[in-house]
Image: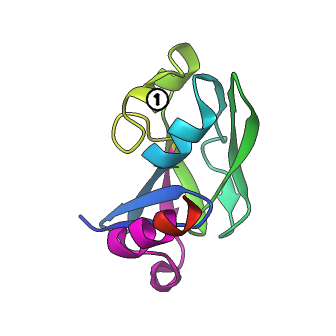
């Protein structure tokens, strides 16, 4: 399963035209202890780079942007009761939503793991 990243620190894992989306480990560390995740509505149509969800932590509140366009088909309801899952496993159990992709060619504009890691080095 390919994983892609944005410069806004979202990740996308694609399987059979469906993209699981969340924030990166780096973003979770920067936020500190996550206290709330505002999940999108199932059925919501999103466009690439538009606000998908919001996340709050002890340090800050941030928007989470849709890395791809499409329709939200599932949200991680476990985050309603345990938003700290994002801190524990941001790139696994801490996923935010699944998006049925409208245009898979959008993935070409995202970063690979290697390119994302290089990008992070430039932020240090």
Magenta span includes 103: yes
Residue 85, by quadrant, is top left
Residue visible at 39% across and 27% down in the picture: 88
Is residue 7 in sight in this rendering? yes
Q: Is residue 120 left or right of residue 60?
A: left
Residue 23's spot in the image, x, y percent?
Answer: 52, 47
Residue 68 appears left or right of 76: right
Q: Which colour scheme is used?
A: rainbow
**Residue 43 rendering spot, x and y as whole percentages:** 62, 49
Residue 53, above or below 45: above
Residue at the front extreme, as displayed: 124
Picture quadrant of residue 92: top left
Write the start and end of the magenta stretch as one range. 97-120
Nearest the viewer among 38 and 91 is: 91
Residue at the far top in the pictured view: 81
Give the class, few, some or many, for how many residues have Cα within 10 Å of label 1's Cα (few <14, many ≥20): many
Q: What element carries label 1?
A: helix
Q: Is residue 27 magenta?
A: no
- Name the residue rendered at 43%, 60% in the picture: 12
Point out residue 19 in the picture as x, y percentages from the top left corner: 42, 60
- Quarter of the image with the N terminus in it: bottom left
Q: Name the residue under label 1.
A: 87
Residue at the spot 33% in from the left edge and 73% down from the top edge: 114
């Amino acid at each position: 399963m390919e994983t892609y990243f944005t410069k806004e620190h979202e990740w996308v894992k694609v399987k059979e035209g469906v993209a699981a989306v969340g924030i990166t480990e780096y973003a979770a560390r920067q936020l500190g202890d996550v206290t709330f995740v505002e999940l999108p509505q199932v059925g919501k149509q999103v466009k690439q780079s538009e606000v998908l969800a919001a996340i709050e932590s002890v340090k800050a509140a941030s928007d989470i942007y849709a890395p791809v366009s499409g329709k939200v088909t599932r949200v991680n309801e476990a985050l309603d009761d345990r938003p700290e899952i994002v801190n524990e496993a941001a790139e696994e159990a801490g996923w935010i939503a699944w998006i049925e992709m409208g245009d898979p060619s959008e993935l070409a504009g995202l970063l690979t793991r290697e390119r994302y890691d290089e990008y992070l080095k430039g932020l240090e």
